[in-house]
């Protein structure tokens, strides 16, 4: 067995198999547990118009805007995202996609109100 494992060709083959298996595991884990950034990037075509509209609505009401108004802007943008996703994908957005969209919209509105 030691002779077999000390063979450079066998070692190279084992390293190749291990690296390939680890790469496959990484790809599987990324698909199974996508990050929020990956979800936002994957759905940016749906998010971009609603984020832009949410920013415009927040800026239009910027003077004296209340927490309720901001919540309403975010809720409308999130509903618009959900409707666009359902219309174009033919299925409901997942809870993770909704959560990632909510975070992205909330951050964009908060930045718009800071300016």
Image (cartoon, helix red, strand yellow):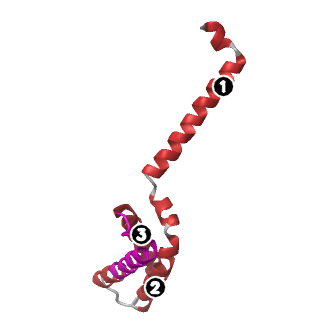
Q: Which quadrant of the structure image shows residue 17? A: top right
Front-most of 103 and 92? Answer: 92
Measured as percent of width and height from the top left, residue 89 is found at 45, 71
Q: Give the residue at x 69% y 14%.
A: 7
From which residue to which does the magenta span run? 74-94
Q: Are marks 2 and 3 in contact (CB under 8 Å)?
A: no
Q: Is residue 89 magenta?
A: yes
Outermost residue on the front side: it is: 90
Q: Earlier in the sequence, mark 1 or mark 2?
A: 1
Q: Earlier in the sequence, mark 2 or mark 3?
A: 2
Measured as percent of width and height from the top left, residue 46 is found at 48, 75
Chief secondary structure of the magenta portion: helix
Packing grade of label 1 (10 A; few <14, some 14-19, many >=20) is few
Can you tell which of label 1 and label 2 is closer to the viewer?
A: 1
Q: Earlier in the sequence, mark 1 or mark 3?
A: 1
Front-most of 89 and 54? Answer: 89
Instruction: Identify the residue under disc 3.
Output: 101
State whether residue 115 appears in this view.
no
Instruction: Identify the residue under disc 2.
Output: 53
Task: For mark 1, give the secondary structure.
Answer: helix
Instruction: Identify the residue under disc 1.
Output: 13
Packing grade of label 2 (10 A; few <14, some 14-19, many >=20) is some
Task: For mark 3, give the secondary structure.
Answer: helix
Front-most of 86 and 73? Answer: 86
């Amino acid at each position: 067995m030691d002779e077999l494992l000390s063979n450079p060709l066998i070692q190279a083959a084992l390293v190749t198999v291990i690296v390939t298996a680890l790469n496959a595991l990484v790809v599987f884990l990324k698909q199974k547990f996508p990050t929020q950034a990956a979800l936002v990037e994957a759905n940016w075509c749906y998010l971009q118009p609603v984020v832009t509209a949410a920013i415009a609505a927040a800026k239009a009401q910027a003077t004296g805007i209340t927490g309720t108004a901001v919540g309403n802007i975010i809720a409308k943008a999130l509903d618009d995202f959900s409707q666009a996703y359902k219309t174009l994908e033919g299925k409901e957005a997942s809870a993770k996609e909704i959560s990632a969209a909510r975070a992205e919209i909330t951050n964009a509105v908060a930045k718009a109100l800071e300016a």
